[in-house]
Image: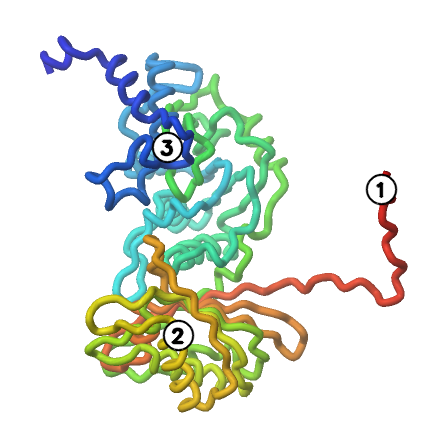
Protein backbone atom coordinates (compact mmCIF):
# COMPACT_ATOMS: atom_id res chain seq x y z
CA UNK A 1 0.00 0.00 0.00
CA UNK A 2 2.91 2.39 0.76
CA UNK A 3 4.28 1.90 -2.78
CA UNK A 4 0.83 2.57 -4.22
CA UNK A 5 0.62 5.87 -2.35
CA UNK A 6 4.15 6.84 -3.34
CA UNK A 7 4.20 5.87 -7.00
CA UNK A 8 0.62 6.32 -8.21
CA UNK A 9 -2.37 8.17 -6.87
CA UNK A 10 -5.91 6.86 -7.35
CA UNK A 11 -6.55 9.63 -9.89
CA UNK A 12 -3.54 8.60 -11.96
CA UNK A 13 -4.61 4.96 -11.87
CA UNK A 14 -8.05 5.98 -13.14
CA UNK A 15 -6.50 8.07 -15.89
CA UNK A 16 -4.26 5.17 -16.98
CA UNK A 17 -7.19 2.76 -17.06
CA UNK A 18 -9.31 5.22 -19.04
CA UNK A 19 -6.49 5.66 -21.54
CA UNK A 20 -6.42 1.90 -22.14
CA UNK A 21 -10.19 1.86 -22.65
CA UNK A 22 -10.08 4.65 -25.26
CA UNK A 23 -10.26 2.76 -28.53
CA UNK A 24 -8.74 4.47 -31.62
CA UNK A 25 -11.29 2.63 -33.76
CA UNK A 26 -14.19 3.52 -31.45
CA UNK A 27 -15.35 -0.10 -31.44
CA UNK A 28 -18.63 -1.18 -29.86
CA UNK A 29 -17.22 -3.67 -27.34
CA UNK A 30 -13.57 -4.63 -27.88
CA UNK A 31 -11.09 -5.10 -30.71
CA UNK A 32 -7.38 -5.56 -31.43
CA UNK A 33 -6.93 -1.81 -31.17
CA UNK A 34 -7.82 -1.66 -27.47
CA UNK A 35 -8.38 -4.71 -25.25
CA UNK A 36 -7.92 -7.82 -27.37
CA UNK A 37 -4.58 -9.62 -27.45
CA UNK A 38 -3.42 -13.23 -27.52
CA UNK A 39 -3.29 -13.50 -23.73
CA UNK A 40 -7.05 -12.93 -23.38
CA UNK A 41 -8.22 -14.53 -26.63
CA UNK A 42 -10.58 -17.05 -24.91
CA UNK A 43 -12.49 -14.11 -23.40
CA UNK A 44 -12.79 -11.90 -26.51
CA UNK A 45 -16.55 -12.47 -26.78
CA UNK A 46 -17.02 -11.27 -23.19
CA UNK A 47 -14.83 -8.14 -23.27
CA UNK A 48 -16.97 -4.98 -23.17
CA UNK A 49 -15.03 -1.78 -22.62
CA UNK A 50 -17.84 0.80 -22.62
CA UNK A 51 -19.55 -0.14 -19.31
CA UNK A 52 -16.22 -0.07 -17.47
CA UNK A 53 -15.24 3.12 -19.26
CA UNK A 54 -18.43 4.91 -18.20
CA UNK A 55 -18.03 3.66 -14.64
CA UNK A 56 -14.43 4.89 -14.38
CA UNK A 57 -15.35 8.24 -15.92
CA UNK A 58 -18.03 8.68 -13.28
CA UNK A 59 -15.60 7.87 -10.50
CA UNK A 60 -13.01 10.20 -11.97
CA UNK A 61 -15.54 13.00 -12.41
CA UNK A 62 -17.35 12.69 -9.09
CA UNK A 63 -15.29 11.27 -6.25
CA UNK A 64 -17.57 12.86 -3.62
CA UNK A 65 -19.20 10.26 -1.42
CA UNK A 66 -22.36 12.27 -0.70
CA UNK A 67 -24.64 13.76 -3.36
CA UNK A 68 -28.30 14.55 -3.97
CA UNK A 69 -28.68 10.98 -5.28
CA UNK A 70 -27.47 9.51 -2.00
CA UNK A 71 -24.36 7.89 -0.66
CA UNK A 72 -21.87 6.20 -2.98
CA UNK A 73 -22.47 2.45 -2.74
CA UNK A 74 -18.97 1.02 -2.98
CA UNK A 75 -19.86 -2.68 -2.86
CA UNK A 76 -23.36 -3.11 -4.34
CA UNK A 77 -24.65 -6.68 -4.28
CA UNK A 78 -27.79 -8.69 -4.88
CA UNK A 79 -27.73 -9.98 -1.30
CA UNK A 80 -27.80 -6.45 0.11
CA UNK A 81 -30.63 -5.49 -2.26
CA UNK A 82 -32.64 -8.45 -1.03
CA UNK A 83 -32.12 -7.24 2.53
CA UNK A 84 -33.26 -3.74 1.52
CA UNK A 85 -36.54 -5.14 0.13
CA UNK A 86 -37.52 -6.92 3.33
CA UNK A 87 -40.83 -5.52 4.58
CA UNK A 88 -41.43 -3.64 1.32
CA UNK A 89 -44.62 -3.98 -0.73
CA UNK A 90 -43.61 -2.43 -4.07
CA UNK A 91 -40.44 -2.86 -6.12
CA UNK A 92 -39.75 -0.83 -9.28
CA UNK A 93 -36.91 -1.47 -11.74
CA UNK A 94 -35.87 1.07 -14.39
CA UNK A 95 -33.85 0.49 -17.57
CA UNK A 96 -33.53 1.59 -21.17
CA UNK A 97 -34.22 -1.99 -22.25
CA UNK A 98 -35.09 -5.33 -20.76
CA UNK A 99 -32.83 -7.75 -22.64
CA UNK A 100 -29.72 -7.89 -24.82
CA UNK A 101 -27.61 -10.87 -25.85
CA UNK A 102 -25.10 -9.83 -23.20
CA UNK A 103 -27.52 -11.30 -20.63
CA UNK A 104 -26.66 -14.78 -21.92
CA UNK A 105 -23.53 -14.70 -19.77
CA UNK A 106 -25.61 -14.72 -16.58
CA UNK A 107 -27.53 -17.92 -17.45
CA UNK A 108 -26.52 -21.54 -16.90
CA UNK A 109 -28.46 -24.71 -17.70
CA UNK A 110 -27.97 -28.07 -16.02
CA UNK A 111 -27.72 -31.34 -17.96
CA UNK A 112 -31.44 -31.97 -17.36
CA UNK A 113 -32.51 -28.58 -18.69
CA UNK A 114 -32.98 -26.75 -15.37
CA UNK A 115 -31.86 -23.17 -14.81
CA UNK A 116 -28.95 -23.21 -12.36
CA UNK A 117 -28.10 -19.51 -12.74
CA UNK A 118 -30.31 -16.59 -13.74
CA UNK A 119 -29.89 -12.81 -14.18
CA UNK A 120 -29.72 -10.99 -10.86
CA UNK A 121 -32.77 -8.85 -11.73
CA UNK A 122 -34.88 -11.97 -12.26
CA UNK A 123 -33.63 -13.52 -9.01
CA UNK A 124 -34.53 -10.31 -7.17
CA UNK A 125 -38.02 -10.15 -8.70
CA UNK A 126 -38.81 -13.81 -8.07
CA UNK A 127 -37.64 -13.72 -4.46
CA UNK A 128 -39.46 -10.47 -3.74
CA UNK A 129 -42.81 -11.56 -5.22
CA UNK A 130 -42.87 -15.15 -3.99
CA UNK A 131 -42.13 -14.20 -0.38
CA UNK A 132 -45.45 -12.35 0.03
CA UNK A 133 -48.55 -12.67 -2.18
CA UNK A 134 -49.58 -9.06 -1.47
CA UNK A 135 -46.43 -7.63 -3.04
CA UNK A 136 -46.25 -6.30 -6.58
CA UNK A 137 -43.46 -5.14 -8.90
CA UNK A 138 -43.15 -2.83 -11.87
CA UNK A 139 -40.60 -2.85 -14.65
CA UNK A 140 -40.24 0.53 -16.38
CA UNK A 141 -38.44 0.42 -19.75
CA UNK A 142 -37.74 2.93 -22.51
CA UNK A 143 -37.37 0.50 -25.40
CA UNK A 144 -40.41 -1.80 -25.43
CA UNK A 145 -39.61 -3.45 -28.77
CA UNK A 146 -40.67 -7.10 -28.47
CA UNK A 147 -37.73 -9.47 -27.97
CA UNK A 148 -37.45 -11.61 -31.12
CA UNK A 149 -37.34 -15.36 -30.77
CA UNK A 150 -34.47 -15.88 -33.21
CA UNK A 151 -31.98 -14.12 -30.90
CA UNK A 152 -32.52 -16.48 -27.98
CA UNK A 153 -30.66 -19.48 -26.65
CA UNK A 154 -32.39 -22.28 -24.74
CA UNK A 155 -31.30 -20.74 -21.43
CA UNK A 156 -32.55 -17.31 -22.41
CA UNK A 157 -35.93 -18.76 -23.43
CA UNK A 158 -36.30 -20.46 -20.05
CA UNK A 159 -35.23 -17.37 -18.11
CA UNK A 160 -37.71 -15.18 -19.97
CA UNK A 161 -40.37 -17.82 -19.40
CA UNK A 162 -39.95 -17.22 -15.66
CA UNK A 163 -40.46 -13.51 -16.26
CA UNK A 164 -43.53 -14.17 -18.43
CA UNK A 165 -45.08 -16.29 -15.68
CA UNK A 166 -44.83 -13.37 -13.23
CA UNK A 167 -46.52 -11.13 -15.81
CA UNK A 168 -49.29 -13.65 -16.53
CA UNK A 169 -49.96 -14.04 -12.80
CA UNK A 170 -50.46 -10.28 -12.50
CA UNK A 171 -47.58 -9.90 -10.04
CA UNK A 172 -45.30 -7.99 -12.41
CA UNK A 173 -46.36 -5.10 -14.61
CA UNK A 174 -44.34 -3.57 -17.44
CA UNK A 175 -44.68 0.12 -18.29
CA UNK A 176 -42.97 2.25 -20.90
CA UNK A 177 -41.45 5.67 -20.27
CA UNK A 178 -39.91 8.09 -22.80
CA UNK A 179 -36.68 8.42 -20.81
CA UNK A 180 -35.22 6.84 -17.69
CA UNK A 181 -35.78 9.48 -14.98
CA UNK A 182 -32.53 10.94 -13.67
CA UNK A 183 -30.45 7.77 -13.66
CA UNK A 184 -32.91 5.77 -11.56
CA UNK A 185 -32.30 2.02 -11.40
CA UNK A 186 -34.47 0.84 -8.52
CA UNK A 187 -37.15 2.23 -6.26
CA UNK A 188 -38.21 0.29 -3.17
CA UNK A 189 -41.46 1.62 -1.69
CA UNK A 190 -40.88 5.19 -2.96
CA UNK A 191 -43.98 6.46 -1.11
CA UNK A 192 -42.92 5.18 2.30
CA UNK A 193 -40.35 6.54 4.74
CA UNK A 194 -38.78 3.08 4.95
CA UNK A 195 -38.10 2.97 1.21
CA UNK A 196 -34.96 3.29 -0.90
CA UNK A 197 -33.95 4.96 -4.16
CA UNK A 198 -31.01 3.53 -6.12
CA UNK A 199 -29.29 5.44 -8.94
CA UNK A 200 -26.88 4.12 -11.57
CA UNK A 201 -24.47 5.97 -13.84
CA UNK A 202 -25.36 3.52 -16.66
CA UNK A 203 -29.08 3.12 -17.24
CA UNK A 204 -28.42 2.14 -20.88
CA UNK A 205 -27.37 -1.37 -19.78
CA UNK A 206 -30.21 -3.91 -20.09
CA UNK A 207 -31.69 -4.75 -16.70
CA UNK A 208 -31.32 -8.50 -17.30
CA UNK A 209 -27.70 -8.08 -18.36
CA UNK A 210 -26.52 -6.18 -15.29
CA UNK A 211 -28.75 -5.12 -12.42
CA UNK A 212 -26.28 -2.67 -10.87
CA UNK A 213 -23.95 -1.33 -13.59
CA UNK A 214 -21.58 1.59 -13.33
CA UNK A 215 -21.35 3.81 -10.25
CA UNK A 216 -24.20 3.10 -7.82
CA UNK A 217 -25.65 5.52 -5.26
CA UNK A 218 -28.44 4.73 -2.82
CA UNK A 219 -30.65 7.02 -0.80
CA UNK A 220 -32.58 5.95 2.30
CA UNK A 221 -35.92 7.72 2.28
CA UNK A 222 -37.28 9.65 5.23
CA UNK A 223 -40.10 12.09 5.85
CA UNK A 224 -38.40 14.78 3.74
CA UNK A 225 -37.42 12.56 0.81
CA UNK A 226 -40.53 10.42 0.19
CA UNK A 227 -41.10 10.34 -3.58
CA UNK A 228 -44.86 10.53 -4.07
CA UNK A 229 -44.25 12.33 -7.38
CA UNK A 230 -42.26 9.35 -8.64
CA UNK A 231 -45.07 6.97 -7.75
CA UNK A 232 -47.57 9.11 -9.67
CA UNK A 233 -45.26 9.26 -12.71
CA UNK A 234 -44.85 5.48 -12.73
CA UNK A 235 -48.61 4.93 -12.64
CA UNK A 236 -49.05 7.39 -15.52
CA UNK A 237 -46.65 5.51 -17.81
CA UNK A 238 -48.64 3.38 -20.31
CA UNK A 239 -48.73 -0.33 -19.45
CA UNK A 240 -47.41 -2.94 -21.88
CA UNK A 241 -49.13 -6.32 -22.14
CA UNK A 242 -46.07 -8.21 -23.33
CA UNK A 243 -42.49 -7.43 -24.24
CA UNK A 244 -41.84 -10.80 -25.89
CA UNK A 245 -42.58 -11.46 -29.57
CA UNK A 246 -43.16 -15.13 -28.78
CA UNK A 247 -45.28 -17.19 -26.39
CA UNK A 248 -42.82 -17.21 -23.48
CA UNK A 249 -45.18 -18.73 -20.91
CA UNK A 250 -45.87 -21.69 -23.25
CA UNK A 251 -42.19 -22.68 -23.39
CA UNK A 252 -41.80 -26.33 -22.44
CA UNK A 253 -38.87 -28.56 -21.53
CA UNK A 254 -38.61 -32.32 -22.09
CA UNK A 255 -35.75 -34.31 -20.54
CA UNK A 256 -34.72 -37.76 -21.73
CA UNK A 257 -32.47 -40.05 -19.73
CA UNK A 258 -30.36 -42.93 -21.01
CA UNK A 259 -32.46 -45.75 -22.55
CA UNK A 260 -35.61 -43.61 -22.41
CA UNK A 261 -37.75 -43.89 -25.53
CA UNK A 262 -38.25 -40.62 -27.44
CA UNK A 263 -41.87 -39.49 -27.70
CA UNK A 264 -41.76 -37.93 -31.17
CA UNK A 265 -45.54 -37.45 -31.48
CA UNK A 266 -45.61 -35.60 -28.15
CA UNK A 267 -42.42 -33.56 -28.68
CA UNK A 268 -43.50 -32.29 -32.12
CA UNK A 269 -47.26 -32.29 -31.67
CA UNK A 270 -47.34 -28.62 -32.66
CA UNK A 271 -46.75 -29.48 -36.33
CA UNK A 272 -49.36 -32.24 -36.48
CA UNK A 273 -51.50 -31.91 -39.62
CA UNK A 274 -49.96 -28.53 -40.54
CA UNK A 275 -48.30 -27.52 -43.79
CA UNK A 276 -44.55 -27.18 -43.35
CA UNK A 277 -43.30 -24.05 -45.12
CA UNK A 278 -39.64 -24.31 -44.20
CA UNK A 279 -37.23 -26.14 -41.92
CA UNK A 280 -33.92 -24.63 -40.82
CA UNK A 281 -31.38 -26.67 -38.87
CA UNK A 282 -28.52 -25.02 -37.00
CA UNK A 283 -26.18 -27.64 -35.61
CA UNK A 284 -22.37 -27.45 -35.98
CA UNK A 285 -22.05 -31.24 -36.00
CA UNK A 286 -25.24 -32.16 -37.90
CA UNK A 287 -23.38 -33.68 -40.85
CA UNK A 288 -20.29 -35.10 -39.12
CA UNK A 289 -19.18 -38.71 -39.45
CA UNK A 290 -17.18 -40.09 -36.53
CA UNK A 291 -16.41 -43.36 -34.74
CA UNK A 292 -19.87 -43.40 -33.14
CA UNK A 293 -21.72 -43.11 -36.44
CA UNK A 294 -22.80 -40.80 -39.23
CA UNK A 295 -24.87 -37.88 -37.95
CA UNK A 296 -26.34 -37.48 -41.45
CA UNK A 297 -28.44 -40.58 -40.76
CA UNK A 298 -29.81 -38.94 -37.58
CA UNK A 299 -30.75 -35.78 -39.49
CA UNK A 300 -32.52 -37.73 -42.23
CA UNK A 301 -34.37 -39.88 -39.68
CA UNK A 302 -35.61 -36.82 -37.79
CA UNK A 303 -36.80 -35.17 -41.00
CA UNK A 304 -38.70 -38.37 -41.71
CA UNK A 305 -40.35 -38.01 -38.30
CA UNK A 306 -41.42 -34.45 -39.17
CA UNK A 307 -42.94 -35.60 -42.46
CA UNK A 308 -44.84 -38.42 -40.75
CA UNK A 309 -46.26 -36.19 -37.97
CA UNK A 310 -47.30 -33.39 -40.32
CA UNK A 311 -48.69 -35.86 -42.84
CA UNK A 312 -47.02 -34.02 -45.69
CA UNK A 313 -43.75 -34.36 -47.62
CA UNK A 314 -40.88 -32.02 -46.83
CA UNK A 315 -39.79 -30.07 -49.87
CA UNK A 316 -36.74 -28.12 -48.68
CA UNK A 317 -34.39 -27.97 -45.69
CA UNK A 318 -31.64 -25.47 -44.89
CA UNK A 319 -28.76 -26.73 -42.73
CA UNK A 320 -26.07 -24.55 -41.16
CA UNK A 321 -23.16 -26.62 -39.90
CA UNK A 322 -19.41 -26.64 -39.53
CA UNK A 323 -17.15 -27.93 -42.30
CA UNK A 324 -15.63 -31.38 -41.95
CA UNK A 325 -12.69 -31.68 -39.58
CA UNK A 326 -10.39 -34.28 -38.08
CA UNK A 327 -9.26 -37.62 -39.42
CA UNK A 328 -12.69 -39.26 -39.15
CA UNK A 329 -14.54 -36.99 -41.53
CA UNK A 330 -12.90 -35.40 -44.57
CA UNK A 331 -15.99 -35.02 -46.74
CA UNK A 332 -16.52 -31.71 -48.50
CA UNK A 333 -19.92 -30.04 -48.85
CA UNK A 334 -20.75 -31.75 -52.16
CA UNK A 335 -20.01 -35.20 -50.71
CA UNK A 336 -22.14 -34.39 -47.69
CA UNK A 337 -25.04 -33.35 -49.92
CA UNK A 338 -24.84 -36.68 -51.80
CA UNK A 339 -24.68 -38.69 -48.57
CA UNK A 340 -27.67 -36.78 -47.14
CA UNK A 341 -29.65 -37.28 -50.35
CA UNK A 342 -29.13 -41.06 -50.08
CA UNK A 343 -30.27 -41.08 -46.45
CA UNK A 344 -33.34 -38.95 -47.19
CA UNK A 345 -34.46 -41.40 -49.87
CA UNK A 346 -34.13 -44.24 -47.36
CA UNK A 347 -36.54 -42.37 -45.07
CA UNK A 348 -39.08 -41.67 -47.81
CA UNK A 349 -38.03 -38.11 -48.60
CA UNK A 350 -36.77 -38.50 -52.15
CA UNK A 351 -38.13 -35.11 -53.25
CA UNK A 352 -36.55 -33.11 -50.44
CA UNK A 353 -33.98 -30.48 -51.50
CA UNK A 354 -31.23 -29.40 -49.11
CA UNK A 355 -29.27 -26.16 -48.79
CA UNK A 356 -26.08 -26.67 -46.78
CA UNK A 357 -24.18 -23.67 -45.41
CA UNK A 358 -20.82 -24.29 -43.75
CA UNK A 359 -19.74 -21.77 -41.12
CA UNK A 360 -16.58 -21.32 -39.04
CA UNK A 361 -17.96 -18.61 -36.74
CA UNK A 362 -16.35 -18.75 -33.30
CA UNK A 363 -19.68 -18.23 -31.52
CA UNK A 364 -21.42 -20.88 -33.64
CA UNK A 365 -22.35 -23.49 -31.04
CA UNK A 366 -26.16 -23.39 -30.91
CA UNK A 367 -28.16 -26.47 -31.79
CA UNK A 368 -31.74 -25.80 -32.80
CA UNK A 369 -34.36 -26.47 -35.45
CA UNK A 370 -36.86 -23.90 -36.75
CA UNK A 371 -40.05 -25.20 -38.35
CA UNK A 372 -42.42 -22.71 -39.95
CA UNK A 373 -45.93 -24.08 -40.43
CA UNK A 374 -49.30 -22.85 -41.64
CA UNK A 375 -52.44 -24.26 -40.07
CA UNK A 376 -55.74 -24.89 -41.82
CA UNK A 377 -57.02 -21.62 -40.31
CA UNK A 378 -54.31 -19.71 -42.20
CA UNK A 379 -52.34 -18.94 -39.01
CA UNK A 380 -48.57 -19.11 -39.56
CA UNK A 381 -46.29 -20.10 -36.68
CA UNK A 382 -42.58 -20.64 -36.16
CA UNK A 383 -41.60 -23.39 -33.73
CA UNK A 384 -38.05 -23.57 -32.42
CA UNK A 385 -36.68 -26.74 -30.86
CA UNK A 386 -33.41 -26.49 -28.94
CA UNK A 387 -31.61 -29.84 -28.72
CA UNK A 388 -28.89 -30.20 -26.11
CA UNK A 389 -25.95 -32.03 -27.65
CA UNK A 390 -27.49 -31.89 -31.12
CA UNK A 391 -29.74 -34.01 -33.31
CA UNK A 392 -27.59 -37.13 -33.05
CA UNK A 393 -27.86 -37.08 -29.25
CA UNK A 394 -31.64 -36.65 -29.37
CA UNK A 395 -32.05 -39.55 -31.82
CA UNK A 396 -29.82 -41.88 -29.78
CA UNK A 397 -31.67 -43.61 -26.90
CA UNK A 398 -28.33 -44.53 -25.38
CA UNK A 399 -27.62 -40.89 -24.50
CA UNK A 400 -29.28 -38.14 -22.47
CA UNK A 401 -30.97 -35.25 -24.25
CA UNK A 402 -32.99 -32.15 -23.41
CA UNK A 403 -35.49 -30.58 -25.79
CA UNK A 404 -36.70 -27.01 -25.23
CA UNK A 405 -39.60 -25.77 -27.37
CA UNK A 406 -40.68 -22.16 -27.96
CA UNK A 407 -43.05 -20.76 -30.54
CA UNK A 408 -43.92 -17.47 -32.21
CA UNK A 409 -47.02 -16.59 -34.18
CA UNK A 410 -46.37 -14.72 -37.41
CA UNK A 411 -48.76 -11.93 -38.27
CA UNK A 412 -50.05 -12.19 -41.85
CA UNK A 413 -48.96 -9.47 -44.21
CA UNK A 414 -51.80 -7.19 -45.32
CA UNK A 415 -52.91 -7.88 -48.88
CA UNK A 416 -54.16 -5.00 -50.99
CA UNK A 417 -57.58 -5.62 -52.61
CA UNK A 418 -57.46 -6.55 -56.27
CA UNK A 419 -59.65 -3.65 -57.30
CA UNK A 420 -57.62 -1.07 -55.41
CA UNK A 421 -56.45 1.83 -57.60
CA UNK A 422 -52.72 1.95 -58.35
CA UNK A 423 -50.66 4.26 -56.18
CA UNK A 424 -49.53 7.22 -58.30
CA UNK A 425 -45.77 7.64 -58.59
CA UNK A 426 -44.24 11.08 -58.19
CA UNK A 427 -42.99 12.58 -61.41
CA UNK A 428 -39.25 13.08 -61.69
CA UNK A 429 -38.14 16.62 -62.27
**Label 3 secondary element:** loop
The residue nearer to you, when weighing 157 against 224, is 157
Left or right position of 309 against 47: right
Position above or below: 236 against 61: below
The residue lying at 60 percent from left, 33 percent from top is 178
Residue placed under numbered mark 1 in the picture? 428
The local crowd at label 2, few if under 14, some if 14 to 19, many if 20 or more residues have their Cα within 10 Å, is: few
Mark toward the viewer: 2 or 3: 2
Query: Badge 3 is on which residue?
Result: 213
* Residue 82: image location, x then y, percent: 33, 39
Question: Residue at (24%, 83%) from the top-left corner?
Answer: 259
In primary-sequence order, the first of circles 1 and 3 is 3
Q: Residue at x 38, y 45 (%)?
A: 102
Q: CA distance from mark 2 to mark 3?
A: 49 Å
Give the quarter of the figure containing the N terminus. Answer: top left
Picture quarter with the C terminus: top right
Image depth: mark 1 or mark 3 in front: 1
| Residues at circles 1 and 3 in contact by the CB criterion of under 8 Å | no
Dividing the picture into quadrants, the one containing residue 336 is: bottom left
Q: Is residue 425 left or right of residue 353?
A: right
Q: Nearer the viewer, residue 383 or 194?
A: 383
Between residue 400 and residue 429, name the one nearer to us. Answer: 429
In the image: residue 379, left or right of residue 342: right
The residue that mark 2 highlights is 334
Farthest residue to the top: give it: 6
* Above-or-below relation of 293 to 286: below
Q: Residue furthest left?
A: 2
Secondary structure category for the residue under label 1: loop
What number is the disc on residue 388?
none
Q: Helix, strand, or loop for circle 2? A: helix
Amino acid sequence: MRRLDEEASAAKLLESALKILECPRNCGSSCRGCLQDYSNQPAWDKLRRKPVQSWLKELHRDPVVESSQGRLWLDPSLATLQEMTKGASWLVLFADRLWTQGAEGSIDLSADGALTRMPAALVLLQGFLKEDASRHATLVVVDATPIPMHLLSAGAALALRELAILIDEGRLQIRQCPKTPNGLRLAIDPVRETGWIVHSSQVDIAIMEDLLPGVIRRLKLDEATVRSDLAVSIQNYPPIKSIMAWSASETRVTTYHVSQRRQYDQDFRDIHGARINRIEIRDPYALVENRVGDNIDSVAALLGVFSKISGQPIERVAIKTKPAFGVDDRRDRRQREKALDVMLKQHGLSGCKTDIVESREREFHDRWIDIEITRSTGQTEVHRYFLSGGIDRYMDMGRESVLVHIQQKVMPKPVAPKDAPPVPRPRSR
